[in-house]
Image (cartoon, rainbow, N blue to C red):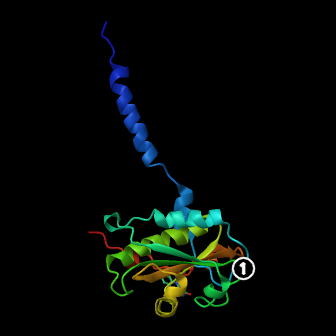
């Protein structure tokens, strides 16, 4: 009778296939988070953000990819209402600002600006995944870089690239909260 070699050959193949399947597992919640985010503004409300949630949000920034894995960013968490309101006005109590900075003068941070942009996006999305509202700002960068660097204690020779405001929010219908986007037809070319 012919001997069967099934277990010998099949096991590594099966394990490889299972590994592949695991790597490609669909994570619908993560996809939805990327697709349904919106920049909160008037629906920010007062309320605290736990230290553990702040650290989860910052960890998302820490995990962002960067060119040559340089990780050029520094994250400054502004919890002081007095200081935060000099950067973004009329913030309800408990809203915080996370300033993302990197070495350079703000115009010559070079590729670090892209790295910081990716960390900014991760922080922005992580906050919403945890149930908070968030909004990215670059408008206040002149104020931060020209007037508040020392007060914020930015690292030596760093300039702020962006900041993310995080706070509790009143629920709004996500479909009506996000502004319209261009269509794939407007921005994609296949060659
Ligand atoms: C790089 C960048 C800079 C931004 N700067 C500001 C800002 O200075 N002030 C502000 O109110 N919103 C700012 N925003 C928020 C955008 O206006 C908002 O993300 C965009 O209009 C899309 O909004 P939606 O996601 O709610 O549809 C900024 C967003 C990005 C990505």
The quarter of the displayed image where residue 134 is located: bottom right
Identify the residue at the far top of this view. 1
Q: Nearer the viewer, residue 109 or 114?
A: 109
The residue sitting at 43% across, 38% down in the picture is: 18
The residue sitting at 52% across, 54% down in the picture is: 27
- Residue 98 shown left or right of residue 92 in the figure: left
42 vs 63: above or below: below
Q: Nearer the viewer, residue 5 or 19?
A: 19
Q: Position of residue 162 (x, y in %)?
A: 48, 81
Q: Position of residue 96 (x, y in %)?
A: 62, 78
Dot 1: within a 10 Å radius of its alpha carbon, few (fewer than 14), some, or many (20 or more) residues?
some
Give the labeled residue for mark 1.
45
Q: Quadrant of the N terminus?
A: top left
- Residue 21 shown left or right of residue 76 in the figure: left
The quarter of the displayed image where residue 151 is located: bottom right
The quarter of the displayed image where residue 13 is located: top left
Cβ of mark 1 under 8 A from ligand 1: no
Q: Position of residue 48 (x, y in %)?
A: 71, 72
- Residue 131 shown left or right of residue 31 in the figure: right
The residue sitting at 56% across, 66% down in the picture is: 57
Q: Secondary structure at mark 1?
A: strand
Q: Quadrant of the C terminus?
A: bottom left
Give the mark count: 1
Q: In the rendered image, is residue 69 in sight?
A: yes
Q: In the rendered image, is residue 35 in sight?
A: no
Q: Nearer the viewer, residue 43 or 64?
A: 64
Q: Position of residue 156 (x, y in %)?
A: 42, 80
């Amino acid at each position: 009778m012919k001997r069967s070699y099934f277990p010998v050959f099949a096991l590594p193949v099966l394990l490889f296939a299972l590994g592949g399947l695991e790597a490609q597992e669909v994570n619908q919640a993560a996809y939805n988070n990327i697709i349904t985010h919106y920049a909160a503004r008037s629906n920010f409300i007062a309320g605290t953000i736990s230290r553990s949630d702040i650290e989860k949000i910052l960890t998302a920034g820490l995990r962002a990819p960067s060119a040559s894995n340089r990780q050029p960013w520094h994250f400054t968490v502004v919890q002081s209402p007095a200081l935060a309101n000099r950067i973004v006005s009329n913030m309800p109590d408990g809203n915080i600002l996370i300033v993302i900075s990197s070495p350079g003068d703000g115009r010559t941070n070079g590729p670090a600006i892209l790295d910081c942009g990716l960390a900014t996006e991760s922080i922005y999305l992580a906050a919403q995944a945890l149930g908070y509202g968030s909004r990215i700002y670059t408008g206040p960068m002149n104020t931060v870089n020209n007037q508040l660097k020392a007060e914020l204690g930015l690292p030596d020779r760093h300039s702020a690239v962006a900041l993310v405001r995080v706070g509790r929010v009143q629920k709004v219908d996500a479909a009506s909260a996000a502004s319209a986007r261009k269509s794939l037809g407007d921005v994609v070319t296949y060659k």
